[in-house]
Structure formats: structure tokens, C-alpha cells
Amino acid sequence: MRWADDPQGESIFWLNGMAGTGKSTISRTVAQSFADKGDLGASFFFKRGELNRDDATRLFKTITAQLIAKDSSLATHVIAAIEADPAITGKSLREQFEKFILEPLRKKPLGNLKGDPDEVKQIVFVIDALDECRREDDIKVVLHLLSQPQALSSVRLRAFVTSRPELPIRLGFNGIKGSYQDLVLHEIPKTVIEHDIGVFLNYKLIKIRDNYNSLSCSERHLPLDWPGPEIVKTLVQMAIPLFIFAATICRFIEDQAWCDPASQLAKVLEYQSRTQQSEIDKLDATYLPILNHLLKDAGAARNSLVDEFRTVVGSIVLLAEPLSISSLAHLLDIPGSVIYRRLSSLYSVLSEPISPESPVRMFHLSFRDFLVDPGKQGTNPLWVDESATHERIATRCLELMCSGDHLREGVCTLKMPGTACADVEPAVIDVALSSPVRYACLHWVYHLERSNSRISDDHQAYSFLKIHFLHWLEALSLLGSVSESISMINTLQALIVVGYAKALY
């Protein structure tokens, strides 16, 4: 708050920290605080592997929409920019930032968003998890644009940015030295972290105890002093500096599937000796109790359980965007009951869908990092082979698009071939292109690229394109994504070159 209020402060406040230290939680709190003060211009939360949130193409358009929602007078200038250049929405980040944000604010009459003509008002953008933007060049451009002092008479732009300290981010900030203030979250004094995680654990465990006792007979009640200060202290030491550890083990302890908080807590404490002062060991202690618990009573069904886990959960954590249980079942060609069975004991790490059509999401990206970490192949019994899983998903996408009437000429049976996509009712498109088919059309190349497969004339991708290339383009057009076909074709061409190079080698 002091940074935002300081007229001489830097343009960017960079909060950085390792995975699981609580950056996104802080971002939400900071965004709400700025909103309460009337200073929040907009917020954007990047999320790797989720459509529209893992690249910067929609960053400034989203910010523009939120600014207009707060001050409708800006809309006139944005509309004028679009009318002057209808292609502006597909142009560079720099042009979008200038035309959609700076010029409308520059042309706005004197006064801040509240209409006070005598006050220079700061507008703060909250941008979370910038490291999850998959295009490294975009990261540098975004930081450069946000770091530049802007010639605005009545508005001072600021950006609160969070990220992991990964190389592309560090290089980006290295290019704007002197234009940002930073704070390293995992280097905050240990006593502060101990206090904060302790407050969180005490609150959550008391709530778990009271909820459990209210639903149990008196003979099974947990003691009123459960789990006790020493146990909480032990959990705090196991967690430091990862808030994700505290949040995950609390969900594990209160999991209604087991309905036994004391026993669940005991399983967590078994990993006390494994938590050293490193992020890798912390993630072991965070996720291994959950995964090992799945295998504890598997017996002869262990191999089947492991295969199901890798098929279902491995796919969920590597999808380009979250899918519902019904869509995932259709895409993977497995019964929905198998997915429900594998998710039933994993709601401490995956969101519980409220309906079969609700998407299943990870609570935290570190769960995916943990599952696919090559270094854990020997220690994690449910380790997921990332390349093999991408290949399996890519194969299923191609099979789905090649089967039945999913992709064909005139998929929406339009009477006029020249009908504009905007004139086609969304309900018609939804019927013709169901959620799993949409996913396959949009992301089969994404998975194929990450599978490290060799592409040649006998590959399934070639057979698909030979028959359905134009049908695929029509589907992408109906989905408003035909422009993305260019980058996908470029990717396929690169894979063909790589494939032939490997064959020659």
C-alpha cells in the first residue's frame, strides 16, 4: 500500500517466491484491498495449461474491459480505436497497450476514475503468476510496457506482479533495472512465516475438529484440545516456507471420504523426518501422504490402480484447459465411473466438481510439477510420464475427430456456405461440436508437440489431415479460432522436420 501511494515509487512491485509460498493468495488479498480503496484498475491471473490464461494475448484486452466496467467514459475511445483499426485486437501487445489503455486514459477528461478533478489517482493492475505465461518474449514485453513512465495528466499507472523467480522472469526484470521494487516471499524472516502458518493451521484444525465432532457420536469426539500446540508446532516446521503444504494437509485431514481426522493427521506426521530445508522434500511431504494412502490397501489391484491413476489424473494435470468429468470420459474413451473412482480420494489436491459438467481443476500447479518430475520416477509410486501422457491424449484427440460425424463438411448444416460465424447460434455449434470435440480440435497439436513423437507419412496426424483438413478448419472457424491454425500448422511442420532428422540420424 505504501508503494502504491508513493508518487516517487517504482512502476512495478514484484513479489516473487518459490512454488507454494502463497503468491496467488496474496494477490487476491491485495487486489481486494486496492478495490476497496478504489485503486484497482484490473487484475489478470495467469494459469499454465488453461485456455486464455497461459499466454498474454488476452492480457491487455481483459484489462481494458475491466477499466471500462469501472469507467464507461473510456469505452468511446476504445471503440474509436477498434473502428480506426479493426485488426487491432490481433496486433502486438505494444499496440494494444497503447491503443486500448494509454490513449483512452490520456484522452479522458481531467480527473481520476472517481471523477475527482484535483487528484492524480493511481490505477493499480494486479498481474499474478506471470511466470505461467508460456511465451518468454511476451513476458519481457509486458514487463517493459508496464515499467515505462506514462505521460498521463491525471492517472499514475502501477503494476503489482507476482511470479516464481524463473529464468525468463529474472531476465525480464533484469532488462528494467531501476523500474521496480521487489520482495522475495520465501526470504521473509522465519519468525514471521512461522507465525502466519501457525495462525492458519490453528484456525483450520479447530474448524475441522468442531465440524467432525458435530457430526459424530460423543464416543468418537476429538478432545477439545486436539491436536494440541506441540502437534501444530510440528506441522508448522514441516510446512515452512510453503503455505501450500499447510493448505493441502488440512484438506487431506478433513477429507470426508475418510471421515477420520486423527488418523489422517497421523499419516501426515509420518513424513516429519522427510521435511528438510528444500522445496523438493517439502513437496514430498505435501503430496506423498495422499498418494501413498491410495495404494495402502490396493493389494492385487495395485497395478490396475496405478494405470487408472496415470490415465485419469495424469491427463487432468496435463490438459491444455480443464475439462468436466463427462467430457474427459468421452475424450479418453473410458467410463465416467472410473474417473469418479480415481478422484474420490484426491479432493485435497483436485477440486470437487459440483456436477458432471463442472471442470476438474488442480488446486496448485505444484501438484503437476510433483507428478511429472523426472527426478521422482523412483520415489513416487504414481509418477506420471509426461511425454507418454501427452502422446496418449494426442492420439485420443485424433481418434475422436476421425470418428463418426464429429468433423465433416457442413458440420452445422448451414443453408448458406458463406454464412458468417457470428450469425450461427451458439446452441447450434454446441450440438455440432461438443466439449471434447472442441478440445480435440483446439489442442491436438499442443499435445502432439509435447509428446516428442516422430512425425512421418504413416503417422495418424497425416491420415487425419489428408481426410479432414478442411473440416478441421471449418470447425476452428466456427469456434472463433481459425487464426490459430497457422501457428498449429507451423508447429506440425517443425515436428515433421524433427521427425525426418531423427529418422536420418
Image (cartoon, rainbow, N blue to C red):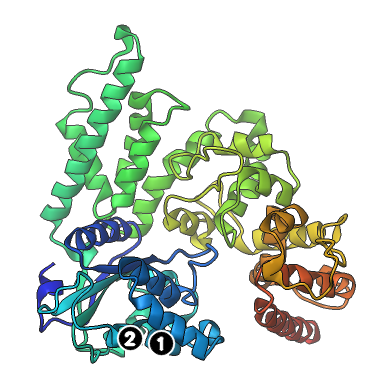
Residue 471 point in image, percent of width and height = 83, 70
Residue 446 point in image, percent of width and height = 65, 70
Does residue 397 appear in this view? Answer: yes
Q: Tell me the CA gap for discs 1 and 2.
A: 6 Å
Mark 1 residue element? helix
Residue 78, quarter of the rendered image: bottom left
Mark 2 residue element? helix
Q: In the figure, 100 relative to 40: above or below?
A: below
Residue 23 point in image, percent of width and height = 29, 61
Q: In the figure, 70 relative to 117: above or below?
A: above
* Three-letter code, disc 2: Leu
* Three-letter code, disc 1: Lys
Residue 99, numbered label: 1
Q: In the figure, 199 relative to 168: above or below?
A: above
Assess whether mark 2 and mark 1 are in contact (beta carbons under 8 angstroms).
yes
Residue 102, numbered label: 2
Residue 504, numbered label: none
Q: Is residue 146 found left or right of 444 in the rendered image? A: left
